[in-house]
Structure formats: C-alpha cells, structure tokens
Amino acid sequence: MDATAEAPTLRALLHRRELQLRLEGDEHDLESGALDRHVRWVHSSDLADPTPFLSEGLALLTTGTQFRDAGDDAFRSYVHRLSARGVVALGFGTEVVRDGIPPALAEACRAERMPLFEVPYRTPFIAVARANAEAIAAQAYARRSWALAAQRAIALAALRPDGLGATLAELSRQLDTWVGLFDAAGVLSREHPARGLESAVLDELQDEVGAVLRRGARAGSSLRIGGAPFTMQTLGRGGHLRGVIAIAAAELDQEGRGVVTSVVAMAGLAFEQQQSLTRAHDLLRAGLVQSLLAGDAALARRIARDLWGGLPAAPVHVAVTDAAVARSDAVSEWLTLRAAETRGAVFHGRADDALVVVSRDDDVFDDLATRFEARLGVSEAVPYAEFGDAHAQAVTALRRGTEPVTRFREIAASGVLSALDSEAARSLAAARLAPLREHDLEEGTALVETVRVWLENDARIDTAATALGVHRHTVRARIGLAQRLLETDLTSFAARADLWAALQVSRPG
C-alpha cells in the first residue's frame, strides 16, 4: 500500500528535528518494534496514577512533579501501571522540576522495556502533541488519497478485455500482496502474482475456501495459515455463491476494506452478467443430452465441437448423479472448467432432474464424487449409437448402488435376480411362499427349506436328501405336498424358476 505520509509512530516523533527529543537508553533494550508502534495520541499528566484517564496506544508526557520525595518503588509501580494500561511510551520533560531524567525512572522503564525519551525544556508538550496529530492527519489524508487513486485504477482496469483478471491484478498491485480468485467449485482460477504462495499454504487455503462455499452463505472472514494472515470475501448471493476472493494480508484498514469492497462488487457484477450466458449453455447442454438419448449424435457432435471443443471420443462412459447434485451450480462449474482444461474430454448436461456426465476416462467420476460428496451410477464404455442403453445402465447402477460411485458392471455381475430387490418383489415373494410357511408353522414341517435345497441341487431328489440328511422318500413327499399347497406343477421349468426367484428375493440379508 502507499506510504507517502510518515506513519504516526514514536520513531517518527524522535526524528522530528525541531522537537529535539532524545531516546533514553538503547533501542535494543526495548521490545521488538516498540519504536514503530502507532502513537494514537500524545497526552500529558503529572498525576501519581493517570491510568484511569488514559487509553491504549498513547504516549504520556510528564514533568515528574508526582515524584517529589518518591522512592524507587514508586517509580516501578508507576511505570508498571502505564505498561499494563497500554501506554506505548513515556516522555519526561526535563529542567522543569529537575534536571535530567531520574535514574530510578529510567531503570523502571528498562525493566518494563518501555521506551523513555527526554523532552527538553525549550520544547513545549503541546508541540509534541501537535506534531503527532499532524502526522495522524497527514496519514489519514494520504490513505484517503490512496484509496481514491486505487479505486480509479481498478475502475480503469475493469474496462480492459479481461476486466476481471485485470481488476484482480490491479488490486494485488495496489495492496502489494497476493490476491487469488476461487471459482464456485473452489478451484483457484486466477492469482496475482502467479505462484505467489507455497503449495502447502495454497492447499490449506483451498480447503478453507471449499468449506466457505459449502456453507453457501455470504461472508467475509479472516484467518491465519502457516502464520500468514488471509482475508476472504465471497462473491454472489447467499445460496448461489459464485466464488471467493482471497487476499494475503493482515487486517485491512477502512480505506483498504473500501478498495476491496469495490473489487468484490465489480467481480460480483461480472459473475452475474455471466449468469445469463451460463443458463443458456445449460439449456443447450440439456438439449444435446436429449439428442444423444434420441440417437442423434451427429447434431450433438457438431454443436459441442463449435462451443466446447467437441464431445469425448468414443467409446464413452455415461454417468448419472442424484437430483441434489444436478441442482448444484458448483458441480456444473467444476465440470465446465474440467471440460475447458481437457478440451472436449468431458461433457455434461441435465436430464430428468439428474446430471448426465459423459467421459472416456471414468476417473473423472471418482474425482466428482470425492470433491462434492456425490453419488453416481456409471455405465459400461459404449459407442454413441448405444448412448440410450448406457444411460439406462447408469440409472440402474445409481438406484442399485450404495457406494459413492457404482459401476454397472458391478451390478451386472450380481445377476438378474439382484434387480428384483424391491418392495414390490419382496411382497410378491412373501405371497408366493405364504402357503408353505404357514404349513411349516402349523405342522412343524420344513417345506420351505426342502424346496430350497431341492432347487439348489437341480431338482434331484437323492442329492437333496443327502444335503438335508433325510430319506429320499421324505423329500419326494415334501415336494409333492408343496406342489399341492402352491397349486402348481413343479415339473415345469417356468414354475421352478418362479419359485426359485421368490426364495432368492425373500432370503434374509
């Protein structure tokens, strides 16, 4: 930031030649930076205990009348009270009550590491106070002038072709610090200067930005990462955040905050202006998904090539997300950026209250699920002519899967009967097996278990009898009874298959 006006510090006062102030002792005996602390005001008092009337951050001047006949303890307690109150320095006016600074006072200040300076007789206390007040006023004027110049420069930067990037670059230059813009997906899209942060610091900052975006509320916040201070400002409306501006800087003063606020407003306006174009692209993508589902890949390829660099090369995997993810602006933004970075390697669009994602490389689905805690169903790799079938596979995998990413080949490996795991199927199975279960309960028979073992052993009586540990005539009698109770002919393959399906659906766990 601009610093043309000298800051109102004790060092600045000591450098004012007309005041002829002299620091008592050596600067190295003081706390680090003690002479560079801001002096908020200069006050004078000869009270034995002026602390009830003092505020933090001021320099106190005294002639020492309160120390007449005082012992060393009085000096120590006096300086200790000033230090505890937040007084930044003590000035002693010499040749008014006594010549020179009392040694006991100098020793007490060294013990508290408080700066002590001599104000000579020919320098009025009011002159010291006026000099500090002038420095405060000059700095305030300089800061206001800087803020106006900075806002003018930022406004001019916003008129450049890449207005947003130029605005952030100008903000970085004006604040003389690193500035980064994170998009709605929490990805760093612009930074000035480039690679201005260590990778570990940037990773932690990105995690913090992601947490802010997930909360979805507009906010400004300050934090420290690796000992470095950062300020974050969200962009966009609550619930529809468009990104975050992060600034590597200590807490900004009023003028600095005003400059940042103007940049946030400009960036927010730029994002809002992009919204209409984004909505149009979303509608167009949804239309292309419908075109692919209808089997017209040629139209989708032509439009996608002109706008987004083309569709992913076949064969492709088709993935479907749940409805909540489909409504997420952050997911769509991340996929759009991924497509731009990989030039046509990813395509997405909404369809039937879900998000359809198309990619040759199915690693993108794992990245999406991890980053946004989403659930996806993923199809087998297919040519575009089979896009509709692949979409159906993805929907089936999403409905049947329990993992963040479920691939259709995993569902297919479990067999066709696994798809019958539904409330309707379980109700039908229970009704089909009810006569056998009721007979087992009333008569103590084992018809259900016998029929199950019999079918598992390819309807062979002898093998089933061995597995059950009973005589083959017992198995034959039980199967005959089951046929009568079920009113079906179990010599028919269709009847056996139906009964087997009922047993599989009703199997616990």
Image (cartoon, rainbow, N blue to C red):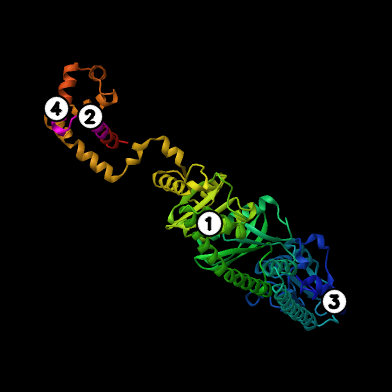
Principal secondary structure, stretch drawn in magenta: helix
Q: Secondary structure at mark 4?
A: helix
Q: Which residue is mark 4?
A: 481
Of callouts 4 and 3, which one flags the residue occurring earlier in the amino acid sequence? 3
Q: Is residue 83 left or right of residue 12?
A: left
Q: Callout 2: 10 Å neighbours few (<14), some, many (20+)?
A: few
Q: What is the distance, in whole Å, between disc 4 and disc 2 at their CAs?
A: 16 Å
* Disc 3 versus disc 1: nearer the observer: 1
Q: State whether residue 202 is above or below residue 143.
A: above
The quarter of the picture where residue 191 lies is: bottom right
Q: Which residue is mark 3?
A: 16
Q: Secondary structure at mark 1?
A: helix
Q: State whether residue 270 is above or below residue 373.
A: below
In the picture, the disc for residue 331 is 1
Instruction: Report the amino acid beneath label 2.
Output: Ser
Q: Secondary structure at mark 2?
A: loop
Q: Which residue is mark 2?
A: 492
Q: What is the distance, in whole Å, between disc 1 and disc 2 at their CAs?
A: 53 Å
Q: State whether residue 242 is above or below residue 406.
A: below
